[in-house]
Amino acid sequence: MIHRKRGAPPSPPLSTPLRAAAFPPVDALVAEPRLIAARLIACGVPACDREDLLQIVLVAAWKAIQSGRYRPDPRADPRRALYAWLQGITWRQAGHHLGRAHVRREVPVDDPRALVDEGSVDPDRRLLARAALRALADLPAPHRELLLAAADPRSITAHARAHCIAPATAARRLQLARKALAHRIARRLW
């Protein structure tokens, strides 16, 4: 408990704001639509939603001013302080707007799998493909290079010529690389 001397004025409560709330005129807010629109464009808000969001930003700013949450630095230029504060409100409102499902073009449906072909979503095959890619990444570089060359539209003979090796040697190395990949995939699955 802190005791004060007799006759001393009471200390201000700890929740007293450091700066007094400022009340810019409504005209100052309404005079900044180009600034708000520019920030909305920079945030990626679609053109069809900008006018509505501009109104939402102005209403949110006015409510914040009325509740005393606008406290600019008294040393700063009033217009610049208002400009920076509006930038923050615009950025937050644009983020909220862009995060909404209807803006992201999501349509809620009862069964999302009904919109996709039966054969395109197979979790087992997807897991096998992931295991194969991980096993491919674990192979030594020469094996990886040969396997990727075999998947290329060019023939393995063209790959052999490009690396100055005999086509039979390239084919034998490709066979070894395939065996090594199959061994690694089997080891990963078991």
Image (spheres, helix red, strand yellow):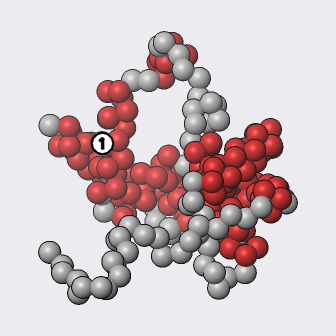
Q: Residue placed at 35% from the left, 27% from the top?
A: 123
Q: Position of residue 64 (x, y in %)?
A: 60, 54
**Residue drawn at 65 percent across, 35 percent down:** 103
Quarter of the image where one finds residue 31: bottom right
Q: How many marks?
A: 1
Q: Position of residue 135 (x, y in %)?
A: 29, 49
Crowd tier of the residue under label 1, counting other residues whose Cα lies within 10 Å: few below 14, some 14–19, many 20 or above: some
| Front-lying residue, 171 or 147 | 147
Q: From the viewer's perspective, is 65 left or right of 111?
A: right
The residue sitting at 14% across, 37% down in the picture is 190
Return the residue at label 1: 131
Residue 103 seen anywhere in this rendered image of the structure: yes
**Residue 151 vertical position relative to residue 2 in the rendered view, above or below:** above
Q: Does residue 19 appear to the left or right of 91 in the view shown?
A: left
Viewer-closest of 36 and 11: 11
Q: Which residue is at a point 46% across and 66% down the rendered structure image?
A: 165
Residue 119 place in picture, x, y as percent: 47, 18
Residue that protrudes farthest toward the front in the picture: 7
Q: Position of residue 134 (x, y in %)?
A: 32, 49
Residue 173 visible in the shown view: no
In-front residue for pair 187/17: 17
- Horizontally, residue 140 falls left or right of residue 23, namely left
Q: Secondary structure at mark 1?
A: helix
The amino acid marked with disc number 1 is Ala
| Rendered-image quadrant of the N terminus | bottom left
Of residues 13 and 165, the one nearer the viewer is: 13
Within the image, what quadrant is residue 77 found in? bottom right
